[in-house]
Amino acid sequence: MFKRTSYLLLSFGLLLAGCNQTTQTQPTAHSSADTASQTETYQNPLDVQFGDPYVLYDQASKTYYMYGTGGGAHEGFATYSSKNLVDWKNEGQVFFGNKEGSWDVKNYWAPEVYHVNGKYYMFYSADWRHNPNNEEENFRIGVAVADKPTGPFKNISDKPIFDPGYPIIDANVYFEPNGKMYLYYSRCAYKHPVESEVADWAKKERLFKEIEESWVYGVELNPDFSGVIGEPVLLLRPPVKMNDTQAEWESRSVTSKEVNRRWTEGSYTIKHGDTYYMMYSANYFGGKNYAVGYATAKNPLGPYTKAANNPVLQKNNEQGGVVTGTGHNSIAYSPDGKQMFCVYHGRTTATGEERVVFIDPMRIEKDGRLVVDGPSTTPKPMPLSKY
């Protein structure tokens, strides 16, 4: 996955020579000489095969750590480290699931790691071992803890954080300055058929008998992550009306006859000024139409209003580009907090079905619009060139 070579030469080969990253099996780190000899530009995609990438900046070591789905991990999660957000070293698997007595059993997805009170807490999705009805999708969210960002992470409990009565994935946590913490997650589309004009249209066209949907919820967390406070609040869902300004881009998986589901998932929340920005992904994560939008609110549990300039990140292959399937992003910052970068997975014509990581500058304009300068595959200035 991480071939020891000049990054620009690798990207050039990926895009022009059709090199397929799936043939690279053993990650190795760039040497300091490799990094020093780089020019002051980089080029997407990065040489990391992750889905759902999440980046943590560790103040203690002044190092970035990336976690995600896959990345060579078996029944668990791996991490990569970097000083510049471009050259990533594989640190190996840092969480091993499906252990005796653990709540989790398979399908390890979307980890996010937070540094809290000297410890590192990993929130992640997996299939719950407790499955009396033999559900095909039995996902819940759990928490593991470690003393270092490279693990080893161990579950804090033998059960998920909580059981809302339906499968859930894609944990994201927002920490308020007043000490309150909020867990955002996606209710899976599994066994969740929803009435809407899109569903009526699909049935009339004899495409699908029903349309299942995933929705984003939020709920306050206990301070020790042992459970939740109060009931989850519905925050985001796909549009009900076909004339909704968000309906076209959020319904592409259905209208393109791809699958009978609409998704609202992979949320990531920040606060800018007095406004909460929740980024989210829509459409099938395994398809070309995966894309990112955002919504804003004045309170962490909403109500949220979707942005007029959605989607802010989507495929560009229909405009002459080579990128599809852009989604499930996180946000990375420069050490001084002044620069923002959108970190997400996508696919190119060269990488095929393999999900690889992209990083592009992003910003919030004076008028409040969130803008992502991507997806890009052309050379850009190194993200942290001044550091």
Image: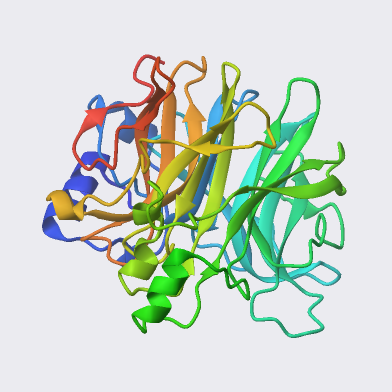
Look at the image and tell me in which quarter the C terminus lies. top left
- Residue at x 87% of width, y 48% of height: 226
Q: Is residue 11 visible?
A: yes
- Residue at x 67% of width, y 54% of height: 124
Residue 224 percent across, percent down from the top left: 87, 40
- Residue at x 70% of width, y 81% of height: 135
Residue 96 percent across, percent down from the top left: 69, 62
304 sits to left or right of 346: right
Q: Is residue 84 visible?
A: no
Residue 11 percent across, percent down from the top left: 22, 47
In-front residue for pair 26/69: 69
Look at the image and tell me in which quarter the N terminus lies. bottom left
309 sits to left or right of 307: left
In-front residue for pair 138/144: 138
**Visual colour scheme:** rainbow
Q: Quarter-wise, where is residue 178 in the image?
A: top right
Q: Quarter-wise, where is residue 251 in the image?
A: bottom left
- Residue at x 36% of width, y 39% of height: 312
Residue 41 percent across, percent down from the top left: 24, 29
- Give the number of marks: 0
Residue 353 drawn above or below residue 317: below
175 sits to left or right of 371: right
In-front residue for pair 362/42: 362
Residue 73 drawn above or below residue 172: below
120 sits to left or right of 366: right
